[in-house]
Amino acid sequence: DGGITQSPKYLFRKEGQNVTLSCEQNLNHDAMYWYRQDPGQGLRLIYYSQIVNDFQKGDIAEGYSVSREKKESFPLTVTSAQKNPTAFYLCASSNTGGPSFKNIQYFGAGTRLSVL
Amino acid sequence: GDSVTQMEGPVTLSEEAFLTINCTYTATGYPSLFWYVQYPGEGLQLLLKATKADDKGSNKGFEATYRKETTSFHLEKGSVQVSDSAVYFCALSDLGRGSTLGRLYFGRGTQLTVWP
């Protein structure tokens, strides 16, 4: 079945530690996204990538980093510079360009990150 | 810039009651509009969409009509069920309005709880 796989489902970070969240998709989508979800604040865009080896900052990129070495994979690293990392992180993917009815974002099941 | 304003929750209803969740947007031109649903502990799923003025999106008994004159896309369902309990997000896309990506701008989400 096609879809987006995020792992792990739960993750704990110690002070000063970097952690990496995995996102893999087999939908053959060009674009991938990372969102952060906090209670009552909706989804905020962290980073996005339209093609391999290229990515752009979203609205809240500080303290995060990404890479896009393969079309299928878009890992997110939460660095020690992110002082308030506790949140639910969602990865998504979509086609790009083309008619708008094809431009639907598909989401993974999320990773819940907590600080020890 | 683009933005979405959603009715604040939580919304609590009895089974078989009528549901309306208000959504208004700010954007130039004619953005595509979406409703996504998030069940507890899961990622977001597309519920319905509309790509031009006066379009009506519908799915699983939910409906929303794209109203350009009032810049609205209110979600409605005639008779809710306990299984509809979830968080609902309104979103718009910037695809085709100076963007080939189709970035989504989300509202803050509305928590719906349906009691038997």
Image (cartoon, coloured by chain):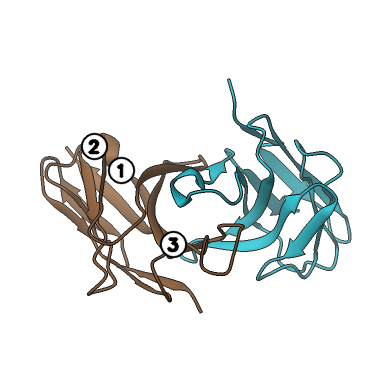
Q: Nearer the viewer, mark 3 or mark 2?
A: 3
Question: What hue represents chain A?
Answer: cyan
Alpha carbon separation for disc pair 2 and 1? 6 Å
Q: Is the residue marked by circle 3 packed among few (<14), some (14-19), or many (20+) residues within 10 Å?
A: many
Label 3 in the same subunit as label 2: yes
Residue at 50% from the left image edge and 41% from the top image edge: B41
Residue at 16% from the left image edge and 37% from the top image edge: B116
What label sits on residue B82 in the rendered view?
2
Q: Is residue A84 visible?
A: yes
Q: Position of residue A62 (x, y in %)?
A: 77, 70
Q: How many numbered marks appear?
A: 3
- Residue topped by disc 1: B85
Above or below B13: residue B96:
below
Question: What hue represents chain B?
Answer: brown
Q: Which image quadrant: the N terminus of chain A? A: top right
Above or below B90: residue B24:
below
User: Label 1: chain?
Assistant: B
In the rendered structure, which disc, 3 or 2, sits on the residue that comes first in sequence? 2
Alpha carbon separation for disc pair 3 and 2? 27 Å
Marks 3/2 in contact by CB < 8 Å: the verdict is no
Marks 2/1 in contact by CB < 8 Å: the verdict is yes
Q: Amino acid at mark 3?
A: Leu
In the rendered structure, which disc, 3 or 1, sits on the residue that comes first in sequence? 1
Q: Is residue B89 visible?
A: no
Above or below A56: residue A51:
above
Q: Amino acid at mark 1?
A: Ser
